[in-house]
Amino acid sequence: MSTILDNLRLAVQSGSVSDAEAALEGQTPSQIVDILNGTYDGQRRSVSLFFHAIREGHEALVRYMLGARIAAGVDPHEAVNDDGDTPLIVAAWYDRSDMARMLIAERADLNRAETTIGYTPCLVCADRDHTSVMRLLLAARADVDQANDEGATPLNISAQFGQVDVMRLLLAARANIEHTDKFGQSPLYSSSWQNKPDAMRLLIKARADVDRRTNNGNFPLLTASGNGHSDPTHILVRAGADIDSADIDGDAEQNARGRGHHHIATFLADIREAGGYAQYSELFC
């Protein structure tokens, strides 16, 4: 078996179908599937021979491997490792649009999630900022709002990381701009918390609720000011966020001052004294 695996690893490395066929000569269909699910480097169980072929973009070899699964009566799009990564998830993770296009044409399940945190191909693209594969998934009608195990959708994830190019694709596909994860965090809240002003501007332009609260009563202006994020604080106030909103510990000004962010606290105090952002702008801008 070690000789078979060694020869097959060389075939996978080069992408040679003929070498793979030679290495697997005499094996039954079910044995071939088991071997192809074996580890590429002999150590990491998450990187199978099939996984490696997809990652490297060996299209002819991947087609051969899909055919081997069909011959063995196995779903060709079954997971390729112990993490539950399907071939399409691997293609999404490594931004292999060539592989994704082929797998989608071969009727891959667009919405099947892996088993560690419930990432679908769309969630992977949102996390990794992979627009090319995301375009293919959305064109094929992947579920734009399917959430992971923590209730986060692709828009929640991309907003948190400030992946504005992916966000534009999701918004164009009518992703739910107000979806909240299991903590009650909306995309705008996440981008405010993580200091992603470009993502915030995009969401506000799309009419996101600037005052939506989380499960524990937090809201975008409170988290932005409390974390000392100047740009997000200014963006939210300009967009009409309620500076008088408060949680049990006080409003945004009090929160910022209590955490030592005096420049933000002063800005919010000036806004209140002026009677709102429009009046403040006339006085100070």
Image (spheres, rainbow, N blue to C red):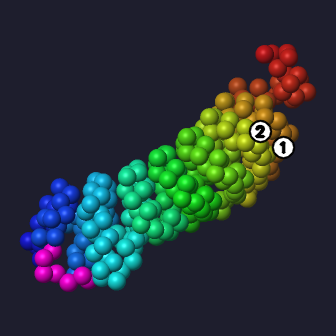
Q: Nearer the viewer, residue 34 or 192?
A: 34
Identify the disc placed on residue 252: 2
Q: Main secondary structure of the magenta part?
A: loop
Residue 25 is a magenta residue = yes
Sequence-first tag of 1 and 2:
1
The residue pinned by badge 1 equals 245
Say whether residue 57 is left or right of residue 199: left
Q: Position of residue 163 (x, y in %)?
A: 55, 42
Image coordinates for residue 20, horizontal then vertical, percent: 17, 67
The residue most toward the left is: 3
* Residue at image point 61% right, 58% down: 144
> Disc 2 marks which amino acid?
Ala
- x, y percentage for residue 95? 40, 50
Neighbor class of circle 1 (other Cα within 10 Å; few <14, some 14-19, many 20+) is some
Q: Residue at x 46, y 68 (%)?
A: 107
Specify the segment rendered in magenta: 24-30
Q: Position of residue 116 (x, y in %)?
A: 46, 67
Residue 209 located left or right of residue 13: right
| Depth order, front residue of 27/4 | 27
Asked if marks 1 and 2 touch (Cβ < 8 Å), the reply is yes
| Mark 2 surroundings within 10 Å by alpha-carbon count, few (fewer than 14), some (14 through 19), many (20 or more) | many
Residue at 36% x, 80% y is: 74
Q: Is residue 200 left or right of residue 52?
A: right
On residue 167, which mark appears?
A: none
Q: Nearer the viewer, residue 25 or 168?
A: 25
Residue 212 colored magenta?
Answer: no
